[in-house]
Protein backbone atom coordinates (compact mmCIF):
# COMPACT_ATOMS: atom_id res chain seq x y z
CA UNK A 1 0.00 0.00 0.00
CA UNK A 2 1.46 3.35 -1.03
CA UNK A 3 2.16 6.12 1.44
CA UNK A 4 -0.48 8.35 -0.17
CA UNK A 5 -3.19 5.70 0.28
CA UNK A 6 -2.21 5.17 3.91
CA UNK A 7 -2.38 8.90 4.59
CA UNK A 8 -5.82 9.14 2.96
CA UNK A 9 -7.08 6.23 5.06
CA UNK A 10 -5.68 7.78 8.21
CA UNK A 11 -7.31 11.11 7.39
CA UNK A 12 -10.65 9.34 6.87
CA UNK A 13 -10.38 7.66 10.26
CA UNK A 14 -9.44 10.98 11.85
CA UNK A 15 -12.44 12.68 10.30
CA UNK A 16 -14.77 9.94 11.58
CA UNK A 17 -13.17 10.23 15.02
CA UNK A 18 -13.64 14.00 14.93
CA UNK A 19 -17.38 13.70 14.32
CA UNK A 20 -17.74 11.13 17.09
CA UNK A 21 -15.84 13.54 19.34
CA UNK A 22 -18.17 16.38 18.32
CA UNK A 23 -21.23 14.34 19.31
CA UNK A 24 -19.66 13.17 22.57
CA UNK A 25 -18.66 16.73 23.46
CA UNK A 26 -22.17 18.02 22.77
CA UNK A 27 -23.64 15.19 24.91
CA UNK A 28 -21.36 16.02 27.85
CA UNK A 29 -22.30 19.71 27.60
CA UNK A 30 -26.00 18.85 27.54
CA UNK A 31 -25.59 16.56 30.58
CA UNK A 32 -23.79 19.35 32.44
CA UNK A 33 -26.70 21.66 31.71
CA UNK A 34 -29.39 19.24 32.85
CA UNK A 35 -27.59 17.71 35.85
CA UNK A 36 -26.02 20.82 37.37
CA UNK A 37 -26.40 24.20 35.68
CA UNK A 38 -30.11 24.47 34.82
CA UNK A 39 -31.46 23.03 38.13
CA UNK A 40 -29.17 25.36 40.12
CA UNK A 41 -29.90 28.37 37.86
CA UNK A 42 -26.18 28.75 37.09
CA UNK A 43 -25.31 30.47 33.84
CA UNK A 44 -23.11 28.75 31.29
CA UNK A 45 -22.41 31.96 29.35
CA UNK A 46 -23.06 32.94 25.75
CA UNK A 47 -26.26 31.99 23.93
CA UNK A 48 -27.01 29.04 26.21
CA UNK A 49 -26.80 31.30 29.28
CA UNK A 50 -29.16 33.82 27.68
CA UNK A 51 -31.52 30.94 26.85
CA UNK A 52 -31.50 29.88 30.51
CA UNK A 53 -32.61 33.34 31.59
CA UNK A 54 -35.43 33.50 29.04
CA UNK A 55 -36.54 29.95 29.95
CA UNK A 56 -36.90 30.88 33.62
CA UNK A 57 -39.61 33.41 32.66
CA UNK A 58 -41.26 31.77 29.65
CA UNK A 59 -40.64 28.01 29.86
CA UNK A 60 -39.55 28.06 26.21
CA UNK A 61 -37.27 25.06 25.47
CA UNK A 62 -33.65 25.98 26.13
CA UNK A 63 -32.25 23.81 23.35
CA UNK A 64 -34.60 25.31 20.77
CA UNK A 65 -33.66 28.84 21.85
CA UNK A 66 -29.96 27.96 21.66
CA UNK A 67 -30.44 26.66 18.12
CA UNK A 68 -32.42 29.72 16.97
CA UNK A 69 -30.08 32.14 18.74
CA UNK A 70 -27.07 30.59 17.01
CA UNK A 71 -28.52 30.79 13.49
CA UNK A 72 -27.52 34.41 12.75
CA UNK A 73 -24.10 33.89 14.31
CA UNK A 74 -23.67 30.67 12.33
CA UNK A 75 -24.29 32.42 9.03
CA UNK A 76 -22.02 35.30 10.04
CA UNK A 77 -19.30 32.74 10.81
CA UNK A 78 -19.89 31.00 7.50
CA UNK A 79 -19.47 34.30 5.68
CA UNK A 80 -16.53 35.77 7.56
CA UNK A 81 -14.67 32.67 8.76
CA UNK A 82 -15.41 30.58 5.67
CA UNK A 83 -14.81 26.94 4.89
CA UNK A 84 -17.11 23.94 4.67
CA UNK A 85 -15.39 22.37 7.66
CA UNK A 86 -16.39 25.26 9.90
CA UNK A 87 -19.99 25.22 8.67
CA UNK A 88 -20.54 21.47 8.91
CA UNK A 89 -18.79 20.80 12.20
CA UNK A 90 -20.16 23.84 13.97
CA UNK A 91 -23.65 23.02 12.65
CA UNK A 92 -23.36 19.46 13.97
CA UNK A 93 -22.17 20.63 17.39
CA UNK A 94 -24.94 23.23 17.76
CA UNK A 95 -27.70 20.91 16.52
CA UNK A 96 -26.71 17.92 18.67
CA UNK A 97 -26.31 20.08 21.78
CA UNK A 98 -29.68 21.77 21.23
CA UNK A 99 -31.56 18.52 20.63
CA UNK A 100 -29.96 16.68 23.55
CA UNK A 101 -30.56 19.57 25.95
CA UNK A 102 -34.29 19.39 25.26
CA UNK A 103 -34.48 15.58 25.16
CA UNK A 104 -32.61 15.02 28.43
CA UNK A 105 -35.22 17.01 30.34
CA UNK A 106 -37.48 13.93 30.09
CA UNK A 107 -34.92 11.47 31.51
CA UNK A 108 -32.83 13.55 33.93
CA UNK A 109 -34.02 14.47 37.45
CA UNK A 110 -35.52 17.97 37.41
CA UNK A 111 -33.73 18.85 40.67
CA UNK A 112 -30.35 17.74 39.32
CA UNK A 113 -27.79 15.74 41.28
CA UNK A 114 -27.22 18.18 44.14
CA UNK A 115 -28.70 21.28 45.75
CA UNK A 116 -25.24 22.57 46.74
CA UNK A 117 -24.34 25.58 44.58
CA UNK A 118 -20.61 25.07 45.06
CA UNK A 119 -20.74 21.46 43.91
CA UNK A 120 -22.98 22.41 40.99
CA UNK A 121 -20.61 25.21 39.99
CA UNK A 122 -17.53 23.01 40.07
CA UNK A 123 -18.89 19.82 38.55
CA UNK A 124 -21.11 21.64 36.08
CA UNK A 125 -18.21 23.83 34.99
CA UNK A 126 -15.84 20.87 34.62
CA UNK A 127 -18.34 18.84 32.59
CA UNK A 128 -19.39 21.76 30.39
CA UNK A 129 -15.75 22.72 29.76
CA UNK A 130 -14.73 19.13 29.04
CA UNK A 131 -17.47 18.86 26.42
CA UNK A 132 -16.43 22.19 24.94
CA UNK A 133 -12.81 21.04 24.80
CA UNK A 134 -13.81 17.90 22.88
CA UNK A 135 -15.71 20.04 20.37
CA UNK A 136 -12.62 22.24 19.94
CA UNK A 137 -10.37 19.18 19.51
CA UNK A 138 -12.70 17.98 16.75
CA UNK A 139 -12.06 21.33 14.99
CA UNK A 140 -15.55 22.64 15.64
CA UNK A 141 -17.06 25.36 17.78
CA UNK A 142 -20.09 25.42 20.04
CA UNK A 143 -21.43 28.55 18.35
CA UNK A 144 -22.42 31.68 20.25
CA UNK A 145 -19.54 33.70 21.64
CA UNK A 146 -17.05 31.31 20.01
CA UNK A 147 -18.13 32.44 16.55
CA UNK A 148 -18.40 36.09 17.60
CA UNK A 149 -14.96 35.97 19.19
CA UNK A 150 -13.33 34.50 16.11
CA UNK A 151 -15.02 37.06 13.83
CA UNK A 152 -13.89 39.99 15.98
CA UNK A 153 -10.39 38.52 16.16
CA UNK A 154 -10.00 37.93 12.42
CA UNK A 155 -11.83 41.05 11.21
CA UNK A 156 -11.10 43.65 13.88
CA UNK A 157 -8.04 42.28 15.66
CA UNK A 158 -9.87 42.13 18.99
CA UNK A 159 -8.27 39.45 21.24
CA UNK A 160 -10.61 36.47 21.58
CA UNK A 161 -10.35 36.54 25.37
CA UNK A 162 -11.71 40.10 25.37
CA UNK A 163 -14.59 39.10 23.08
CA UNK A 164 -15.50 36.17 25.33
CA UNK A 165 -15.23 38.36 28.41
CA UNK A 166 -17.51 41.00 26.90
CA UNK A 167 -20.26 38.59 25.84
CA UNK A 168 -20.12 36.56 29.05
CA UNK A 169 -20.16 39.73 31.16
CA UNK A 170 -23.36 40.86 29.46
CA UNK A 171 -24.99 37.49 30.18
CA UNK A 172 -23.82 37.58 33.81
CA UNK A 173 -25.20 41.09 34.31
CA UNK A 174 -28.51 39.98 32.82
CA UNK A 175 -28.54 36.97 35.14
CA UNK A 176 -27.79 39.15 38.15
CA UNK A 177 -30.64 41.51 37.30
CA UNK A 178 -33.08 38.71 36.46
CA UNK A 179 -32.23 36.27 39.26
CA UNK A 180 -29.76 37.36 41.92
CA UNK A 181 -26.21 38.67 42.13
CA UNK A 182 -25.23 35.66 44.22
CA UNK A 183 -26.15 33.32 41.35
CA UNK A 184 -24.29 35.60 38.94
CA UNK A 185 -21.15 35.27 41.08
CA UNK A 186 -21.51 31.50 41.08
CA UNK A 187 -21.91 31.78 37.31
CA UNK A 188 -18.47 33.40 37.16
CA UNK A 189 -17.06 30.33 38.90
CA UNK A 190 -18.76 28.10 36.32
CA UNK A 191 -17.27 30.06 33.42
CA UNK A 192 -13.79 30.11 34.95
CA UNK A 193 -13.78 26.39 35.75
CA UNK A 194 -15.21 25.48 32.34
CA UNK A 195 -12.47 27.53 30.66
CA UNK A 196 -9.77 25.64 32.54
CA UNK A 197 -11.37 22.28 31.75
CA UNK A 198 -11.77 23.15 28.07
CA UNK A 199 -8.11 24.17 27.82
CA UNK A 200 -6.95 20.98 29.53
CA UNK A 201 -9.03 18.74 27.24
CA UNK A 202 -8.07 20.73 24.14
CA UNK A 203 -4.33 20.79 24.70
CA UNK A 204 -4.02 17.72 26.90
CA UNK A 205 -1.69 17.34 29.86
CA UNK A 206 1.74 18.70 29.08
CA UNK A 207 3.81 15.49 29.15
CA UNK A 208 6.56 16.74 26.84
CA UNK A 209 9.46 19.01 27.73
CA UNK A 210 11.79 21.04 25.56
CA UNK A 211 15.34 21.22 26.86
CA UNK A 212 18.03 23.74 25.91
CA UNK A 213 21.53 23.17 27.26
CA UNK A 214 24.61 25.42 27.14
CA UNK A 215 27.72 23.52 28.14
CA UNK A 216 31.44 23.66 27.56
CA UNK A 217 31.23 19.89 27.04
CA UNK A 218 28.35 20.00 24.58
CA UNK A 219 29.67 17.17 22.38
CA UNK A 220 29.91 14.75 25.31
CA UNK A 221 26.53 15.82 26.67
CA UNK A 222 24.89 15.36 23.27
CA UNK A 223 26.42 11.89 22.90
CA UNK A 224 25.12 10.84 26.32
CA UNK A 225 21.60 12.01 25.52
CA UNK A 226 21.59 10.17 22.19
CA UNK A 227 23.01 6.91 23.56
CA UNK A 228 21.39 6.71 27.00
CA UNK A 229 18.00 8.36 26.38
CA UNK A 230 17.96 7.60 22.65
CA UNK A 231 16.69 11.11 21.93
CA UNK A 232 17.77 13.24 19.01
CA UNK A 233 19.76 16.38 19.72
CA UNK A 234 20.13 19.49 17.58
CA UNK A 235 23.18 21.76 17.99
CA UNK A 236 22.29 25.41 17.49
CA UNK A 237 24.81 28.17 16.95
CA UNK A 238 24.92 30.67 19.80
CA UNK A 239 27.17 33.29 21.34
CA UNK A 240 27.24 35.22 24.59
CA UNK A 241 25.98 38.79 24.20
CA UNK A 242 28.36 40.08 26.88
CA UNK A 243 31.51 38.03 26.19
CA UNK A 244 31.02 37.52 22.46
CA UNK A 245 32.26 33.94 22.85
CA UNK A 246 30.61 31.15 20.90
CA UNK A 247 28.39 28.86 22.98
CA UNK A 248 26.73 26.03 21.01
CA UNK A 249 23.23 25.32 22.33
CA UNK A 250 21.83 21.78 22.53
CA UNK A 251 18.12 21.43 21.86
CA UNK A 252 16.05 18.29 22.40
CA UNK A 253 12.54 17.15 23.32
CA UNK A 254 11.97 14.57 26.06
CA UNK A 255 9.06 13.23 28.06
CA UNK A 256 8.28 14.52 31.53
CA UNK A 257 9.60 11.31 33.09
CA UNK A 258 12.96 11.80 31.36
CA UNK A 259 13.65 15.27 32.79
CA UNK A 260 15.48 14.03 35.89
CA UNK A 261 17.50 11.61 33.77
CA UNK A 262 18.68 14.34 31.43
CA UNK A 263 19.56 16.57 34.39
CA UNK A 264 21.69 13.77 35.82
CA UNK A 265 23.42 13.14 32.47
CA UNK A 266 24.27 16.80 32.05
CA UNK A 267 25.49 17.16 35.63
CA UNK A 268 27.75 14.13 35.23
CA UNK A 269 29.49 15.70 32.22
CA UNK A 270 29.39 19.37 33.20
CA UNK A 271 28.15 20.53 36.59
CA UNK A 272 28.44 24.16 35.45
CA UNK A 273 26.10 23.71 32.48
CA UNK A 274 23.11 26.01 31.97
CA UNK A 275 19.77 24.28 31.33
CA UNK A 276 16.36 25.69 30.39
CA UNK A 277 13.35 23.33 30.49
CA UNK A 278 10.00 24.31 28.99
CA UNK A 279 6.61 22.76 28.24
CA UNK A 280 5.65 21.33 24.85
CA UNK A 281 2.13 20.18 24.02
CA UNK A 282 2.94 18.13 20.94
CA UNK A 283 5.95 16.73 19.08
CA UNK A 284 5.68 15.34 15.56
CA UNK A 285 8.38 13.44 13.75
CA UNK A 286 10.97 10.77 14.48
CA UNK A 287 10.71 9.39 18.00
CA UNK A 288 7.23 10.86 18.53
CA UNK A 289 3.96 10.92 16.58
CA UNK A 290 4.16 10.62 12.80
CA UNK A 291 3.68 13.87 10.90
CA UNK A 292 0.80 13.76 8.42
CA UNK A 293 -1.02 16.61 6.66
CA UNK A 294 -4.29 17.86 8.22
CA UNK A 295 -7.52 17.06 6.43
CA UNK A 296 -9.06 19.73 4.25
Image (cartoon, rainbow, N blue to C red):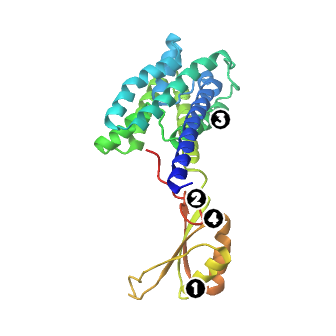
Residue 145, relative to residue 247: is it above or below?
above
Residue 207, relative to residue 274: is it above or below?
above
Q: Which residue is mark 1?
A: 272
Whichever of labels 2 and 3 marks the residue nearer the N terminus, that label is 3
The residue that appears at 66% across and 69% down in the rendered structure is 258
Q: Could you say which quadrant of the image residue 104 lies in? A: top right
Whichever of labels 4 and 3 marks the residue nearer the N terminus, that label is 3
Q: Nearer the viewer, residue 176 or 102?
A: 102
Label 3 secondary element: helix
Label 1 secondary element: loop
- The CA span between labels 2 and 4 is 13 Å
Label 4 secondary element: strand
Whichever of labels 2 and 4 marks the residue nearer the N terminus, that label is 4
Q: Which residue is mark 2?
A: 289
Q: Which residue is mark 4?
A: 255
The residue that appears at 33% across and 39% down in the rendered structure is 152
Please rate how many residues cluster around mark 3, counting C-alpha atoms within 10 Å: few if below 14, some from 14 to 19, many from 20: some
Q: Which residue is mark 3?
A: 123
The residue that appears at 61% across and 18% down in the rendered structure is 103
Q: Mark 4, mark 3: which one is toward the viewer?
A: 4
Residue 293, relative to residue 197: is it above or below?
below
- Residue 219: percent from left, percent from top: 55, 86
Q: Mark 2, mark 4: which one is toward the viewer?
A: 2
Q: Could you say which quadrant of the image residue 86 lies in? A: top left
- Residue 21: percent from left, percent from top: 58, 37
- The CA span between labels 4 and 3 is 31 Å
Q: Is residue 254 visible?
A: yes
- Residue 248: percent from left, percent from top: 47, 83
Whichever of labels 3 and 1 marks the residue nearer the N terminus, that label is 3
Question: Position of 35 compared to 236: left or right?
Answer: right
Amino acid sequence: MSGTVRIKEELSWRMAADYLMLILGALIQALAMRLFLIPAMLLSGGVSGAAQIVNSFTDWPIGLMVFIGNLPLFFLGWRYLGGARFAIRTGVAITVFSILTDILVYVMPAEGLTHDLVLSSIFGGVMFGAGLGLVYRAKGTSGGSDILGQILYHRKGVPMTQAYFATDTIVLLAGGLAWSWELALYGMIVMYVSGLAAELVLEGPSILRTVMIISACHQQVAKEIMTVLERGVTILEGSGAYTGKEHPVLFCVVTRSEVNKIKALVYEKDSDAFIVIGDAHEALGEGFKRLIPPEA
